[in-house]
Amino acid sequence: MTESGKPILYSYFRSSCSWRVRIALALKSIDYETIPTNLIKDGGQQFSKEFQALNPMKQVPVLKIDGITIGQSLAIIEYLEETRPTPRLLPQDPKKRAYVHMISNLIVSGIQPLQNLSVLKQLRQENNLPWAQKAISSGFEALEQILQGTAGKYCVGDEVTMADLCLVPQVANAERFEVDLTPYPAISRINKTLLTLEAFQVSHPCRQPDTPPELRA
């Protein structure tokens, strides 16, 4: 934490994993300091010795808070949930909580890693777009079916949960990779509704300290 006592978030504006945490911090009204970590500049600032000391996995986000350092977005969100439980992002009902974990893990384990920068770097550049599109579309086909049984206003019922924090950044990735969202009306509807909420707006990649001028909004 900073001398002022603020938590410190190591983040990259376009990182969907970082965005999940930024939404949680905004929803819980936690004031924090951002230290931008550019995943492309200088060969990737996450590979520096200083950053590896924070997170041996060399990934963002990393949150320094309450005297500890946490990597992995869901671990961060769950720590915030346990220590700062208002508003609640994990339902008390065990069945609904299981749905939230199921959807969150589908996205963070079954979709996002397959189209992540570290994976795309291993492919020929001309294969990047079709690979990412296939990975996202495959995951979205499953997610769309699941949402038929779990969704209300949001992914699970009518309250914002951790699942929604995972959904919106992944839809942004889909749009960046030019995925046709027409076959996924539930995903599209929920995403559109969530983007009207202030916490999702202030945490958006186009409004971060390290957002390039041409991408600011």
Image (tube, rainbow, N blue to C red):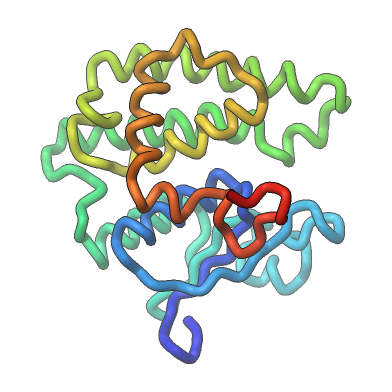
Residue in the image at 54% along x and 28% along y: 111
**Considering only vertical position in the picture, is 209 above or below 124?**
below
58 on left or right of 124: left
Residue that sits furthest to the top in the current view: 183
Q: Seen in the image, is 77 located left or right of residue 37?
A: left
Q: Compared to 103, does 181 lie above or below?
A: above
Q: How many marks?
A: 0
Which image quarter: residue 184?
top left
Residue 108 position within the rendered picture, expressed as x and y whole percent measured from the top left: 49, 37
| Relative image position of residue 154 (x, y in whole percent) | 27, 31
Determine the residue positioned at 57% across, 59% down.
208
Q: Quadrant of residue 112?
A: top right
Residue that sits furthest to the bottom in the current view: 3
Looking at this rendering, what residue extends furthest in the left direction? 93
Residue 22, given in percent of the width and then of the height, sits at: 45, 56
Q: Which x, y percent locates residue 37?
A: 68, 62
Residue at 60% x, 56% y: name it. 60
Q: Nearer the viewer, residue 204 or 17?
A: 204
Q: Quadrant of residue 159?
A: top left
Whether residue 195 is situated above or below residue 13 in the rendered picture: above
Q: Residue at x 20, y 52 (%)?
A: 88
